[in-house]
Image (spheres, helix red, strand yellow):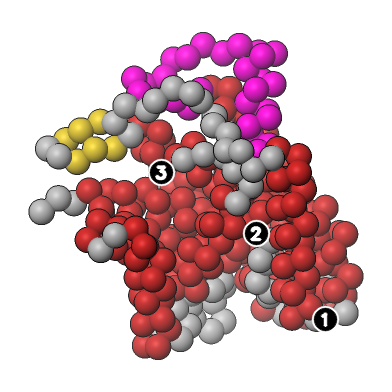
């Protein structure tokens, strides 16, 4: 019995977890589900595509890469800049749309408005770049093989970078003062403001972090498959499923939820066919919610 599905599930699940972490940060601090998060993933993918071309032209970098790895140093630099720009885009969207609704205290209106933001962003991306898929590299990634198991270097790189980024964010949230302030604002923003916390700054940092995680997920997704306007929308449901499965507001839960969703989807494809990918994953989600409504790691009073 081959365990290829497990390898694929962990890699894909790590990418799902990266996006889910951004969504759960937004929920834990601002207390609403941002359905435009998928379009931030797409925006990050396209920003890196543009930046990689510009960096590669203006600053040619030597390709000291592993054999079979198509990710270039220019793309890795573009990933960093693109993720930062995606964070700035998230802040801009908040100032244009969500801030006014938040001041009115309407989280339901914020969630509904995020649908409109999602459609507007997707239309803007598609009108700018067309629906034609793009690729970061025209080279083929040659997979490593171990006793019937194969793993492309690009997939390994994406998984390692994603896990490192998630670990850094988790440690920062737990040990930094700003991380503690984010948890306090998430619990009670009015009380946090009364005791002197800068709630506006906390919201801004939350959007930056959420956007950067989404942008990084977009680059990873584009590297593993292709860059297209709908790629973030395709990842949106697995991201929210992972966040809910792990426990909304729990960053470690988002990672575990991402792995569970990724492995469930990969196993379904391996044993039943690609048409069962989403069905099996969401059946797992429903089962967990029936048995543990708060998710696997969601506990009252504990966020991030």
Work out whether residue 71 can be spotted. Answer: yes
Residue 23 lies, in percent from the top left, at 60, 63
| In this view, 192 is above or below 210 | below
Name the residue rendered at 25%, 63% in the picture.
272
Q: Residue 142, image x and y in percent?
A: 32, 26
Q: Earlier in the sequence, mark 3 or mark 2?
A: 2
Question: Tag 1, which secondary structure?
Answer: loop
User: Image height check: is 144 above or below 185?
Assistant: above
CA separation, marks 3 and 1?
38 Å
Instruction: State how far apart marks 3 and 2 are (Cα).
Output: 20 Å
* Horizontal and vertical percent position of residue 243: 50, 68
Give whichever of discs 3 and 1 has the lower sequence position. Answer: 1
Give the side of residue 192 with respect to residue 218, left or right. Answer: right
- The answer, for residue 205, to whether it is visible in the render is no
- The residue at which mark 3 appears reads as 159
User: How far is mark 2 from mark 1, CA to CA?
Assistant: 21 Å
Q: Nearer the viewer, residue 274 or 219?
A: 274
Q: What's drawn in magenta, residue-wise?
A: 45-72
Work out whether 226 lies above or below 24: above
Please say if 143 is above or below 243: above
Indicate which disc, 2 or 1, sits on the residue closer to the N terminus. Answer: 2
What label does residue 37 carry, if any?
2
Q: Residue at x 25, y 53 (%)?
A: 5
Q: Is residue 55 magenta?
A: yes
Q: What residue is pinned by disc 1?
A: 105
Residue 176 figure quarter: bottom right
């Amino acid at each position: 019995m081959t365990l290829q599905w497990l390898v694929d599930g962990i890699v894909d699940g790590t990418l799902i977890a990266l996006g889910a972490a951004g969504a759960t940060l937004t929920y834990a601090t601002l207390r609403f589900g941002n359905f435009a998060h998928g379009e931030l993933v797409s925006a990050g993918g396209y920003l890196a595509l543009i930046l990689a071309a510009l960096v590669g032209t203006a600053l040619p970098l030597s390709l000291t890469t592993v054999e079979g790895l198509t990710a270039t140093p220019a793309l890795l630099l573009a990933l960093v800049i693109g993720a930062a720009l995606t964070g700035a885009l998230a802040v801009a969207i908040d100032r244009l749309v969500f801030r006014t609704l938040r001041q009115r205290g309407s989280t339901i209106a914020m969630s509904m408005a995020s649908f409109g933001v999602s459609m507007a962003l997707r239309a803007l991306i598609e009108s700018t770049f067309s629906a034609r898929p793009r690729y970061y590299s025209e080279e083929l990634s040659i997979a490593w093989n171990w006793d019937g198991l194969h793993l492309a270097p690009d997939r390994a790189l994406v998984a390692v970078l994603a896990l490192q980024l998630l670990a850094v964010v988790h440690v920062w949230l737990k040990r930094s003062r700003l991380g503690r302030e984010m948890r306090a604002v998430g619990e009670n923003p009015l009380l946090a403001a009364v005791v002197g916390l800068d709630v506006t700054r906390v919201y801004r940092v939350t959007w930056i972090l959420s956007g950067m995680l989404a942008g990084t997920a977009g680059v990873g997704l584009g590297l593993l498959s292709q860059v297209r306007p709908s790629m973030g929308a395709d990842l949106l449901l697995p991201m929210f499923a992972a966040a809910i499965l792990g426990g909304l507001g729990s960053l470690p839960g988002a990672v575990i939820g991402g792995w569970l969703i990724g492995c469930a989807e990969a196993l379904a494809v391996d044993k039943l066919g690609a048409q069962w990918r989403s069905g099996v994953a969401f059946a797992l989600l429903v089962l967990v919610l029936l048995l543990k409504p708060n998710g696997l790691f969601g506990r009252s009073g504990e966020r991030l």
